[in-house]
């Protein structure tokens, strides 16, 4: 059942009462809880502290409904104080949220500092609410789609360095902001028609970043889309306390608006450029990660490093990535499975690849691992070094667990690659 919208004059009056009580941040969210006051705890963290259910008219028969909503708020937000406001009277709920007692109004808060938002759950709720309110205003003014509103929202955050919630400006911990915005961006893009084509499945992206490893100095995604693969590289490098240069390229200017906005918020230096990676020279890097476009046919034939020409976008993408690798560099690619068994140009290129580089790993993934298509995919790990043994695995529905940091296949792969994996710890 949808909760009816409260009287706006009632919520405004409740909001002012919480501000008078010393709450540095007060939000109204008619879809969930009417008014929420955020206070600063002893450690300087900004956390939800009080919630107000605005009800007019109010009588004893409505008390149970109000207490149920306040109980939901405590369960979701871990609030300590719970009130009902009728416009003329205040009621405070007891600690067990079983009865309401008349009171003069909200209790004053203990700490009046502004504080910083560094609780991820709280930040996710506030940022999501702020974005959709932003999107509603933008669509009303300029008829924008959700993605365009998201791009504007991200750019605003990167320029101002703070979150605006109604009348309040909130400082957000950069790592928390980065993590929450990744989640929000994936969710918004995933809801758009064709949006999944701009993303790599996030569990795959995380595994690819860890397979690429944290020892690189320059990471490249020649077909970066929204840049989500590089986000996971940034996470990995931040967690182990290393810095490197991250570069994403894509031909689609619309996609790059999102990628550039996220790059400005990245904890690791990241640049995003508009370029056709099939036509323009790429910088040499020691790490390349990419999920090339699926089913792409090039308008002009591309000359592969074996001398053949093709309009097969997948073959051309592999060649582009391999050419950008420095000696002893590593590329991690997500490709459709068909590339591994097709005949003709694909067969000849696989034969060429086997003599030119080390095909270090082929890991088959089931349908659902490659967004935007139902075809199975393969993770291909290439190394710019002498040919050697190939690690081969075919994963099924437990592929996420197998590719997790403690997964058996992931550990075995790193052992094959000669990497020593350490659980990421902040430096």
Image (cartoon, grey):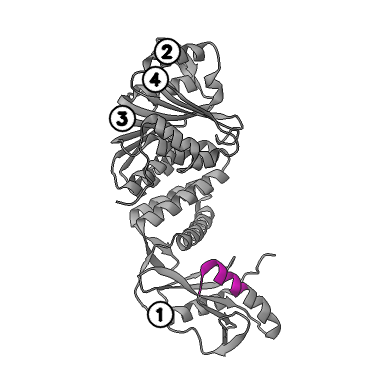
Mark 3 or 2, which is nearer the eye?
A: 2
Task: Find numbered disc 1 in the image and state the secondary structure of the residue it sits on.
Answer: loop
Counting from the top left corner in percent of width and height, residue 64 is at 67, 79
Question: Marks 4 and 3: in contact by CB < 8 Å?
Answer: no
Tell me the residue that label 1 is attached to.
Answer: 22
- What is the quadrant of residue 47 in the picture? bottom left
- What is the quadrant of residue 103 in the picture? bottom right
Q: Earlier in the sequence, mark 1 or mark 4?
A: 1
Q: Compute the Cα span from label 3 to label 4.
A: 21 Å
The boundaries of the magenta stretch are 69-79
Tell me the residue that label 4 is attached to.
Answer: 388
Q: Compute the Cα span from label 4 to label 2.
A: 14 Å
**Image mark for residue 352:** 2
Task: Find numbered disc 2 in the image and state the secondary structure of the residue it sits on.
Answer: helix
**Image mark for residue 285:** 3
The main secondary structure of the magenta stretch is: helix
Is residue 210 placed above or below 376 in the rendered structure? Answer: below
Mark 1 or 4, which is nearer the eye?
A: 4
Question: Marks 1 and 3: in contact by CB < 8 Å?
Answer: no
In the image, is 176 to the left or to the right of 52? left
Counting from the top left corner in percent of width and height, residue 377 is at 54, 29
Counting from the top left corner in percent of width and height, residue 178 is at 40, 52
């Amino acid at each position: 059942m949808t909760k009816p919208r409260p009287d706006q004059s009632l919520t405004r009056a409740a909001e002012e009462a919480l501000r008078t009580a010393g709450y540095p941040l007060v939000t109204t969210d008619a879809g969930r809880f009417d008014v929420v006051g955020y206070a600063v705890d002893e450690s300087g963290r900004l956390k939800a502290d009080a919630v107000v259910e605005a009800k007019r008219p109010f009588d004893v028969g409505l008390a149970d409904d109000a207490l149920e909503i306040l109980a939901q708020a405590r369960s979701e937000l871990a609030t300590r104080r719970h009130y009902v406001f009728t416009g003329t009277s205040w009621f405070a709920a007891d600690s067990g949220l079983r009865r309401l007692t008349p009171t003069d109004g909200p209790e004053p808060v203990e700490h009046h500092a502004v504080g910083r938002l560094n609780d991820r759950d709280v930040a996710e709720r506030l940022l999501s609410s702020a974005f959709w309110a932003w999107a509603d205003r933008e669509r009303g003014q300029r008829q924008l789609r959700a993605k365009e509103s998201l791009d504007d929202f991200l750019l605003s955050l990167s320029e101002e360095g703070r979150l605006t919630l109604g009348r309040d400006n909130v400082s957000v911990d950069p790592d928390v902001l980065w993590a929450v915005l990744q989640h929000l961006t994936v969710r918004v893009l995933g809801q758009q028609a064709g949006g999944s084509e701009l993303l790599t499945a996030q569990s795959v992206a995380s595994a690819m970043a860890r397979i690429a490893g944290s020892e690189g100095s320059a990471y490249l995604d020649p077909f970066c889309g929204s840049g989500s693969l590089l986000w996971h590289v940034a996470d990995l490098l931040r967690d182990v306390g290393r810095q490197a240069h991250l570069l994403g390229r894509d031909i689609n200017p619309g996609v790059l608006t999102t990628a550039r906005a996220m790059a400005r918020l990245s904890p690791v230096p990241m640049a995003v450029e508009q370029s056709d990676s099939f036509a323009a020279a790429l910088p040499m890097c020691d790490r390349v990660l990419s999920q090339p476009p699926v089913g792409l046919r090039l308008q002009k034939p591309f000359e592969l490093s074996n001398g053949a020409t093709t309009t097969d976008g997948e073959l051309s993408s592999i060649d582009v990535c391999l050419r950008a690798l420095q000696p002893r560099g590593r590329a991690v690619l997500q490709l459709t499975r068909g590339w591994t068994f097709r005949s003709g140009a694909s067969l000849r290129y696989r034969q060429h690849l086997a003599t030119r580089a080390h095909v270090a790993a082929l890991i088959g993934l089931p349908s659902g691992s490659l967004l935007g298509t139902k075809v199975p995919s393969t993770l291909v790990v290439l190394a710019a070094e002498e040919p050697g043994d190939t690690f081969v695995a075919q994963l099924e529905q437990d592929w996420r667990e197998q590719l997790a940091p403690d997964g058996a296949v992931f550990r075995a792969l790193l052992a094959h690659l000669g990497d020593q994996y350490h659980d990421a710890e902040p430096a």
